[in-house]
Every structure is written in structure tokens, then in C-alpha cells.
Image (spheres, grey):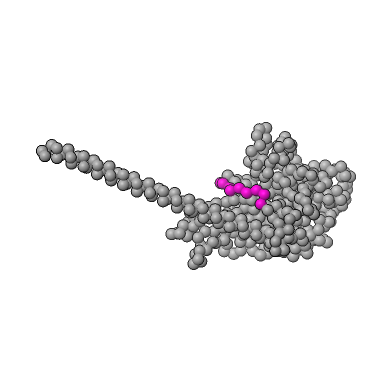
Amino acid sequence: MNARVRGFALVITLALLGLLVLAVVALSALVQVNSQVVASATAQLRARQHAQLALGVALSELQRVAGPDARVTGIAGITGTGPGAANTTRHWCGVWRSDGSFLGWLASGAQPAAAALATGVPDIELLGAAAVGAPAANSEHVVAGKLGVPDADGVPTGRYAWLVLDEGVKTSAYAPSPVGTAPVLFANAANAQARLRDALAAYAGALPRVSTYEQLRVLPAPAAALTASTLQDNLHHVTLTARWVVGDQLRTGFQNVNTNSAIAWRNLLQTYNTSPDAPAPISAATLLARGTSLQNAVAGFSTAGKAAFGPFTAAAGASALLASVFPSGSPTGTQIHAVLAPQLAVRSDTFRVRAYGEALDPADRSRIEAAAWCEAIVQRTPAVAPDGLGRRFVVVSFRWLGPGDL
């Protein structure tokens, strides 16, 4: 073989060797990418499993403490936590026995009595800016505590958190077959309630097909008022439809009075205004001011059926509160209560549950590999739960949450 042929063979050999090396490098990179994708998917799966664990714990606690009929529910604000941007536990849901004795807060990491996280428990916002807007009075962000998920050796592989919100303390935007007068939103100029009220009025015929409050934002034009901001501003005070167990039925039209939301109280007073049984209307200026008075008075108020910084255990007790805020004139608090009494309650049967899960890096337990959030709307039903736990709760809506929902 002459030198020219040998040289050509060497070139071909080197080229083939280069292609082989390139193929090996490409295959190695592909394997590495696939490994990273699998690891990421595994971490995300573990985060979702931890979020589902959190949801399961929340549902179990809700069933355990709120399943029996002789239970009272309300928000932490009635124990003295007033409105304010920093009050991230004001909207926690609490449960009491019918004698007013406290059973617990439905939030992970909560202290047994005070509406605060236990010492050393890290917190996480489960309702933040995307859910309720910028933190402010009447649109507070809400936190819960992160709890560890240990492996067989007790080393945490992730964390979870959960939170239950009481939907019955809010005004129902849509209340089919109401008891008494249908709930009404108090509209003052172009406030958030006015924007929501006007948009809902334009879509009254579509509301029976809407299953959750968040679905309102997908209604087509001309629902221009149903912006993300309008829904955020109302989330703490308005729900789509809250239902109550009455005998063997689910009914709408009630509202739980164990709240210190001025907006919820104003909506109740406006509902009174629309009743044909109202002896005299409440002026808009008076209604606005007295709603704030009710918000500020309800926590420390004490009368039959209510201890100071505790819940109403009977709806009749709200009569004395209304009488203290409307002591004279027309109408009086007693007259207002007489009209509203058929739709006042001291417990709720519809709840919103938010749950969180995270997966930690096995090599560095201080680093979060993946996180997941989910939400469920949970309804107490007339059906009997097993093991003497009262009425059965069921999940009526479930969704995974993204950054735009938090």
C-alpha cells in the first residue's frame, strides 16, 4: 500500500473515531438530561404527594371536629384579631362546642388556643397576593405552618401545610332556593362589591352552571367588571354559594354571624334593606358606619350565648349585638334581627381547603427541589359519617394551583 492510500485510510479512521466520540458525548448528554428530567419529575411527584397528604390531614381534622351538629365555627377575628395587613391568622377557621368551649384552629402548625403559629414552626402563605391582592385591612394574606414528612430514620424528606377557610361567614353571590331574603352585596359607589354585583347581575342566567368562585373570571364579555382584582378584593367576604345542612337537605341563604368582617356585616344589613318585612330602611351612610361598628364590637361583646372573645353559640344572641349598635331610631337592632333571624347561623357547612407540599433535596435538606399547591371546596352533607363523626364531608371541587392562584 503506497503512502497516499495509507494517508487516506488514516484520515477516514480519524473521522470515524471523531464521529464515534461525538456520538458517545451526545448519548451521555442525553442520558444526563433524561436523568435530570426523571429526577425533577420524581421530586414534583413527591411534592404533589405531600400536598395530597396535607389535604387528607385537613379533611380528617375538619370531619373530626366539625362533623357533629353541635358545633360552632367562625373566623379567628372574633377572638380579638382585628383587620390589618400584618394579621395573617385573622381568617383562620376555628371550631367550638355548642357550650362555647374551644376545639381548635383548622390550620397546620397552629397553637392549641391562640390564633398564632407554634414556636419554631416556619410559616407559608397559602393565600397571598394572587388570591386576595396586596395585603391590607380586609384583604389580609393568610399563613399556615410547615410540618415535616420524615423518612424511616426520622429525617425529613419534605414538608406540608394546610389551611381551612370558613365559606359560611361570607355572603353567597348566588343562592338558589334561599331561606328568607336572598343575600345581597352592599354596593357603595364603585367599590369591589358593586363591581361584582353588577357583573353577576349581567350573568344571572349563567350562574347555575358555575361551580366555584374562581370560575367567575372566565365568564365572557361583557363581564369586564369581573377582573382578577375584583375577585381578589372579594375573596375574604364573598363566596359563590355556601350551603347548610337542614334536616335531610342542603339549603342556601344563611350566613354565619361569627365573623368580624365589616363587609360581611354590611352585606347582611343590605340584605335586611331588601326584605319586604323591613319596617324601615337603613341609609347607606349609616349602614357603612354601623358595619364597621359591628366588626369592632363583635369580638369583645358578651351576652347570653356569647362570651367575650368567643363565638355566638346561638343565632338569637346576635340580637343583643345589633341592639347595642342600633340602640334607638328606626330601625332598631331588635327590628333588624327579627327580619334577619331566619337566615342567621352560628356554624358553617361549606369550607375551602388549601394544601401545600414540598420535596427536599436528599443531598441538601435545606434546598427545596419541588413544591405543589392544591385547593378543594368541601361540603358537609346530610349523610351520616362513620365512627360517630357526625355528618359526612365530601369534596365537591378540586384543583391544582399555579403561581397565579397564590
Please state which of residues 224 and 351 is positioned toward the viewer in this rendering: 351
Residue drawn where x is 32% and y is 46% of the image: 25
Query: Residue 47: where, in percent of width, then height?
Result: 53, 54
With respect to residue 204, does 67 lie above or below?
below
Residue drawn where x is 26% and y is 43% of the image: 18
Please state which of residues 11 and 131 is positioned toward the viewer in this rendering: 11
How many numbered circles does the render carry? 0
Q: Is residue 256 visible?
A: no
Q: Is residue 328 left or right of residue 197?
A: right
Residue, far left: 2
With respect to residue 79, does 226 lie above or below?
above
Image quadrant in which you'd find residue 324: bottom right
Q: Is residue 23 left or right of residue 2?
A: right
Residue drawn where x is 79% and y is 60% of the image: 313
Residue drawn where x is 17% and y is 38% of the image: 8
Q: Is residue 158 left or right of residue 327?
A: left
Query: Residue 100: where, in percent of width, then height?
Result: 76, 63
Query: Residue 214: where, in percent of width, then height?
Result: 65, 43
Q: Is residue 120 visible?
A: yes
Residue, far top: 222
Specify start and end residues of the magenta stretch as a single range: 395-403
- The quarter of the image holding the N terminus is top left
Query: Residue 216: where, in percent of width, then height?
Result: 67, 40
Please state which of residues 174 and 262 is positioned toward the viewer in this rendering: 174
Is residue 305 highlighted in magenta? no
Tell me which secondary structure the magenta stretch mostly adopts.
strand
Is residue 397 highlighted in magenta? yes
Q: Is residue 212 left or right of residue 358?
A: right
